[in-house]
Image: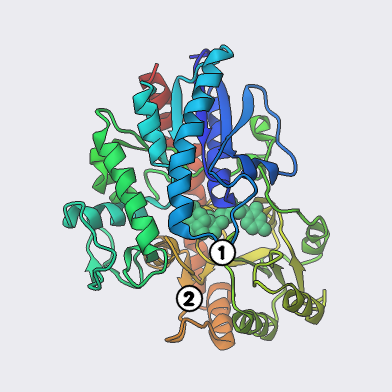
Amino acid sequence: MENKHFLLICMPGQGHINPMFQLGKCLIHAGAGRVTFATTAHGLTQVEAFPSLENLHYASFSDGFDDGIKPTNDPHRIMAELKRVGSQTLTELLLSLSKEGNPVSYLIYTLLLPWAADVARDMSIPSAFLCILSTTAFALCYCFFEERDGVYDSNDNRPPSSIEMPGLPLFTSKDMPSFLLPNDPHASTLIPIFQHHIQALEKDSNPCVLLNTSDCVEEEAIRLISNLNPIPIGPLVSYAFLDENNSTDSSCGIDLFEKSAEYSQWLNSKPEGSVVYVSFGSLAVLQRNQMEKILLGLTSNCRPFLWVIRPSGSNDREFEEKIRDKVNEEVGLIVPWCSQMEVLTHESIGCFMMHCGWNSTLESLATGVPVVGFPQFSDQTTNAKMVEEVWRTGVRARVNEDGTLEAEEIARCLDMVMGGGQRGEEIRRNANKWKGLTLEAVMEGGSSYNNLNAFLEKIE
Ligand SMILES: O=c1ccn([C@@H]2O[C@H](COP(=O)(O)OP(=O)(O)O[C@H]3O[C@H](CO)[C@@H](O)[C@H](O)[C@H]3O)[C@@H](O)[C@H]2O)c(=O)[nH]1
């Protein structure tokens, strides 16, 4: 197994880098050989410090925007360039690795890069798709395309009203991945990419989808995509904070945002289970009005809160400063970025108010922290449904018709999840149960641990 060389490629978003980097660590830990982690040339320049591990190397490919993508760039052009320049520079990267004596024996690619499978096939390199969305969201896309025989017209204004998947609650349009709905601004860009992903897998005589989930977390959805040889190997979250004895996982991850150190001491000063941790991931941009309502909801609830407001997370630096100035440290702390797993494993944390991005959702399950979900887009709506109705580890906050979340609703949800009522107790009990189950899967002898080893043996 030692002389295998895995090339892992992903887009530079934090939600893409984190699970792919964790997979790289798992491969190295399993003794799979050499791992090269590659993202876009511009993405690579954004990393402050690269974790160094034996057998781990870094490389880049070009997406055609080496100076960075500007908000004004047209999404269709971005995706077309990514495919055109990406295919060319990935081929060059594979050739140069081969020339320097380190030929790639296996390629693993993530979301938005389906053309990587075509490049690998042309060069006779086997490949696997790492699905970094929830498998439930991916299975909904799969069912959606199957129902339409793979044909979807993004101008079609008849949205699917619901999708039924055996063993799961009914997914209505408000629970489906937002990009499947024709009125979604990203539908016309993302639907063809998902179709390409599925076609690339179906074209492969031996397709392989590595899933960032575990057998027990998404059993039903995994069964629905069984044609694609799914292999659940997750959750791919940083175990460094979960298992103090695991010296193999000392390196936590690649951060694209500067971390703040002040929060650890602040958390230490708070009672067990008292703090609301608030974060909406690395992409969501909230409106000023919404940020004010969140602030009001948090302060009126009288529980301490730690809120991550990324620089530009509201698109308005001056306004963000004003919000920061309004918060007294006794009540809350606002930071630009933190080590989320370190925060979630801190004993003072009692609730995670979040957007239900898949990584954050898995991190909440793995740390047993109950959730108040305020999904924004993409798979987040589906994940929020699973949190509330399947794992029952939290609630989805109800929004107005225009999508605004009111301060009173925030306070109601926090009281429900953190308070003494029956529902809160049930949620906290479930959160604890899922923490045990998700950890069991990734520990030695667990289902995900065994699945990864079986995958490695199979490709020998
Ligand atoms: O202060 C912070 C905030 C976040 N994180 C980490 O950043 C990642 C964020 O990932 P995720 O929760 O998935 O959110 P997004 O960054 O918004 O992820 C995008 O990518 C995900 C994976 O495809 C999708 O599920 C989401 O819908 C999409 O928005 C997580 O690992 C967090 O631990 C930190 O380390 N510190």
Q: How far apart are marks 2 and 1 (CA)?
A: 49 Å
The answer to which image quadrant residue 336 occupies is: bottom right
Count the labels in the image.
2
The answer to which image quadrant residue 290 occupies is: bottom right
The residue to which callout 2 is attached is 422
Which amino acid type is shown beneath numbered disc 1? Thr
Residue 83 in the image: state x and y as whole percent. Answer: 43, 43
**Does residue 142 appear to the left or right of 254 in the view shown?**
left
Residue 308 in the image: state x and y as whole percent. Answer: 69, 65
Q: Which of 136 and 75 is in front in this view?
A: 75
Q: Nearer the viewer, mark 2 or mark 1?
A: 1
Q: Which of 362 and 122 is in front in this view?
A: 122
Q: Nearer the viewer, residue 231 or 310?
A: 310
Crowding near the residue tagged with mark 2, few <14, some 14–19, many ≥20 C-alpha atoms within 10 Å: few
The residue to which callout 1 is attached is 72
**Does residue 142 appear to the left or right of 308 in the view shown?**
left
Q: Kindly state the secondary structure of the residue where label 1 is placed.
A: loop
The answer to which image quadrant residue 334 occupies is: bottom right
Q: Tell me the residue at 27%/31% (across/down).
A: 204
Q: Kindly state the secondary structure of the residue where label 2 is placed.
A: helix
